[in-house]
Amino acid sequence: MIIPASVFGAIEAAGERILGRGMSSILHMAGDRLGREVAKATVEFMEGSLPPNAIFEFLIDGGTMRGFGHYDVSAFDFEASSGVIRSVDQPFPDDPIPRKDPGCHFAAGFWSGVISSLRGNEVVLDELACRSRGAPVCEFAPRGQNPLVSRGKTDGNDR
């Protein structure tokens, strides 16, 4: 069975309406686990023929081809785990009901898991801006990198 990526966005939105903020942690953790599994399987499939940063780029391109949206990583330094990953068209924030908080917890968790697995150290991405809150793009950055996140301001208009 092939499930369109938009299903995850609908599950996120419904879960947040029912469970509140607790759903965001569940989705981030589920995304993280899947990201680690995908990264590990990709490394095994490639049989060590590509360095981790090239596998990261391969997975970014693969996500685009599979309907998870286009991710721009030109402002993200894989080696340093710093910078910003952007998406203008991922399906996660496309729920028609506006959200209080960013809506791409599964995606943030997925890329956290991919990067953590490939780098061999823990990297947690937070969403800094979200289209579900009116930002033009969704932006993800490693936790602690942006002071707005620690103050609870995660809307793209808070910059």
Image (tube, helix red, strand yellow):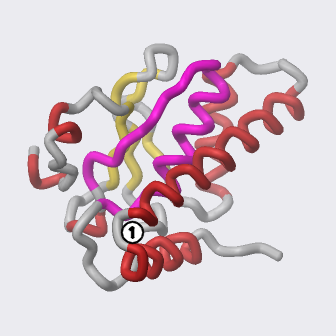
Whether residue 89 is visible: no
Spot the residue most to the left. Answer: 158
| Residue 115 percent across, percent down from the top left | 57, 31
| Residue 152 percent across, percent down from the top left | 18, 47
| Quadrant in the rendering for residue 88 | bottom left
Residue in view at x 80 percent, y 29 percent: 43
Residue in view at x 49 percent, y 28 percent: 123
Is the C terminus in the top left, top right, bottom left or bottom right quadrant?
top left
Label 1 sits on what residue type? Pro
> Is 151 one of the magenta-colored residues?
no
70 w.r.t. 67: above or below: above
Whether residue 14 is visible: yes
| Residue 57 percent across, percent down from the top left | 61, 33
- In this rendering, would 124 be left or right of 57? left
Residue in view at x 33 percent, y 47 percent: 139
| Residue 1 percent across, percent down from the top left | 83, 76
Q: Residues within 10 Å of mark 1 (few under 14, many from 20)?
A: many
Q: Nearer the viewer, residue 29 or 43?
A: 29
> Is 114 one of the magenta-colored residues?
yes
Mark 1 secondary-structure assignment: loop
* Residue located beneath label 1 in the image: 93
Identify the magenta region.
102-129
- In this rendering, would 72 be left or right of 63? left
14 w.r.t. 101: above or below: below
